[in-house]
Image: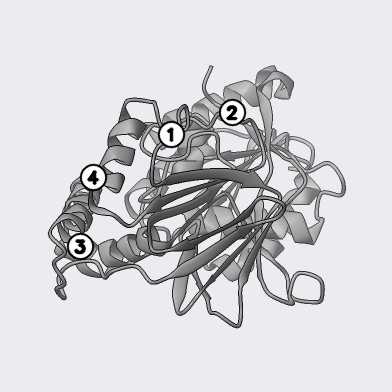
Amino acid sequence: MTGMARVALLSNPRSTGNRALLPRVRSFCAQRSDIFHYEVEDVSQIGEALRTIARVKPAVLVVNGGDGTVQTTLTELHHGGWFGDTPPPVAVLPNGKTNLIALDLGAEGDPIAALERVLEIAREGVEKHVITRELIALSHDGEGEGNARPVLGMFLGGAGLADSILFCRQKVYPLGLPNGFSHVLTALAVIASLIFGIRAAFLPPRPGHVKVSLMRQGQHQGRFSLLIVTTLERMLIGTRTVRQGGMKLMLVDHRPFTLVRAIFAGVSGKLGRQTMNGVHLGEGDEIRIEGVRSSVILDGEIFSADKDRAIVLRQTAPVPFLRLAA
């Protein structure tokens, strides 16, 4: 097998999307000798999986799992050093509930078609399809310098957005509705509770007070409907960021019509192109988030900030990814 595999595929059978998809993936891989398919039973095995995959020397590493699987793979790639100084570019199959990372890399639609495309690129030569993205390294105050390993990801949501994601997971997904409909329902619940000021157990809670500091750029304090930090080129709701590369921050004040205006500006492609009252945009290579019992979600995983224990985000060196879109 060594030296023959152009593509290594790392699958997490426990990721939600894989329950239906995995039989198709297995049969696709069984018919192609230049794919090395490794399945983990748990995300804790991803480090060991990468050690084995490194021996095969693939031209591309494909991750088949939800955002949490991608996040663990990126963290292990960064800290494990299995591939020395030249890790293969990472491709992400469209799988999972949100898949912002896959979307940013041009992987949309049928995962098998995306895998077919990766194989095609690997056979032709990957060079002109490689792009780089910095990652967000998340640690708590006092960590990151010592033994604790920062967790790496590409999209962080905090303040009201984190509350809304948790609300969607805990109250809406269990209703068994299609994902798209669940997300629309959550957005309507957020907007309704904001506009009418309603507090109820079946609606998302009011976001807590947070302080967000950017190195050399001052700080923002207050209650925010949205707090986003990302290194992705697409931020949310169709918005493309103006600046290429680095960590980008967006905050939207927790006021009834500010969020609605920001959403409309995002849909029409104007968000980030012009100054909007109540919408704060920034960028930096270090961002601190402090708040009482304030949660943030990095690529699907939850972390908590407190007033005595800030969350610190730092930018990593660029990492190679494979862009599937033409």
Mark 3 vs mark 2, CA separation in Å = 33 Å
Q: Which residue is mark 4?
A: 180
Q: Nearer the viewer, residue 124 or 306?
A: 306
Q: Which element carries disc 4, helix, strand or loop?
A: helix
Sequence-wise, the earlier of marks 3 and 2 is 3
Q: Is residue 80 above or below residue 263?
A: below
Mark 3 vs mark 4, CA separation in Å = 11 Å
Sequence-wise, the earlier of marks 1 and 4 is 1
Sequence-wise, the earlier of marks 2 and 4 is 4
Whether pointer 2 and pointer 1 mark residues with C-beta atoms closer than 8 Å, the reply is no
Mark 2 vs mark 4, CA separation in Å = 25 Å
Q: Is residue 64 above or below residue 224?
A: above
Mark 2 vs mark 1, CA separation in Å = 16 Å
Frontmost of labels 3 and 2 is: 3
Query: Residue 43 falls in which quadrant of the image?
Result: bottom right
- Few, some or many C-alpha atoms within 10 Å of disc 3 (few <14, some 14-19, many ≥20)? some
Q: In the visual, does 140 lie left or right of 108?
A: right
Identity, as a three-letter code, of the amino acid under mark 1: Ile
Identity, as a three-letter code, of the amino acid under mark 4: Gly
The disc at residue 112 is 1
Q: Is residue 311 above or below residue 85?
A: below
Q: Is residue 313 visible?
A: yes
Q: Is residue 301 visible?
A: no
Whether pointer 2 and pointer 4 mark residues with C-beta atoms closer than 8 Å, the reply is no
Whether pointer 3 and pointer 2 mark residues with C-beta atoms closer than 8 Å, the reply is no
Q: Residue at x 74, y 39 (%)?
A: 88
